[in-house]
Amino acid sequence: MPEILVKNLICRYSKDKPKVLEVPELKLESGKLYFVLGKSGIGKSTLIETLGLMEQTFEDTSSLTFNVSKTSIPDLIRLNDDVRISEFRKKNFAFIFQSTNLFSHLTLGENAMMPCWIDDSIEKAGVEQIEQKVTDLIKSLLPNLWLKYEDKCKDLMITNISGGQKQRLAFIRALATPFKILFGDEPTGNLDKKKADDLIEALLEEIKGKEKKLACLVSHDIDLAIQHADEIIGLSESSDNSSQMAYGTITGENVYFRDNKKWKNQSGKTFNEESLKDELFNLLK
């Protein structure tokens, strides 16, 4: 059963504005890593923000279902039930933003633990486990800091670390959160290939573990997507005959999944890595 099921999703920034995104159907399953690719302005961030319930941009006729809850999310939004939506996000989601959203007055360790401290459902024993997880993640994903500061690394103020290290710390913070679904918006955009690969490998280990989880990342990095994704969701451009205004859409032809050493789209067309790169490069133009 899919973790997220989307049907007839239409997003607008306001009711009197043209639609910016249309998704007839989309299934996202636990235990899988999804990459969302498309050119700038096509609606990638809108899709992530909508799935993450951060923006109430979709129309009432849209269907958005999470199998972690029997709750109808559109119904909650129609009822303006912001409290229950916020609780749902806190209980189930983790986020990695383009801007790291770290607190400059807190230490490295305090920033990584922040989502856990604000979640009152985590008992003391759980917090202790998460603290150890944070320590292990810092040790593996920030090794240059670890070697310099050893066991005092968590006490380092983040004003003393680089932009790339802050981006990795934001990743660590998300991985330490007891999430079911993780959303990322260009989470490796400022990192070199080795550091980006390390972060994605850590994420894959988390989502493919004993408790299957789901991750969906917006990216412009075709090579990173082909190397690591279980499925690649391409956003292409379309327009209405009535308004002629362009918007992003997802069709079976631009959703790609692994099939042994090949890739296939939902329309049955087969690709090797090079032909898929060409396909995705044209999508990003």
Image: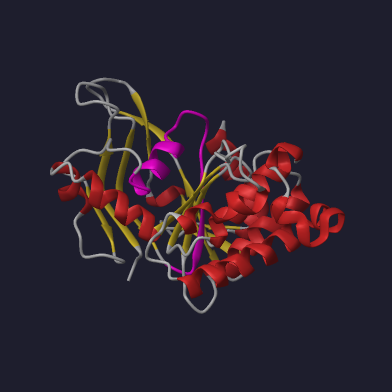
Q: Would residue 275 be visible to someone looking at this image? A: no
Q: Residue furthest right?
A: 148
Return the residue nearer the eye: 245 or 140. 140
Q: Quadrant of residue 19?
A: top left
User: Residue drawn at (18%, 49%), measured in percent from left and top?
Assistant: 76
How many marks on residues?
Answer: 0
Q: In this rendering, is residue 223 above or below 247?
A: below
Q: Would residue 252 be visible to someone looking at this image? A: yes
Report the side of 167 relative to 248 (left or right).
Answer: right
Return the residue nearer the eye: 202 or 88. 88
Q: In the rendered structure, does residue 265 fall within the stretch colored magenta?
A: no
Q: Quadrant of residue 50?
A: top left
User: Residue drawn at (48%, 54%), measured in percent from left and top?
Assistant: 115
Q: Which residues are magenta?
A: 30-53
User: Residue drawn at (45%, 38%), measured in percent from left and top?
Assistant: 45
Return the residue nearer the eye: 75 or 37. 75
Report the side of 32 relative to 69 (left or right).
Answer: right
Q: Position of residue 168 (x, y in %)?
A: 67, 49
Color theme of the render: secondary structure
The C terminus appears in which quarter of the rendering? top right
Q: Residue furthest bottom?
A: 210
Q: In the rendered structure, does residue 37 fall within the stretch colored magenta?
A: yes
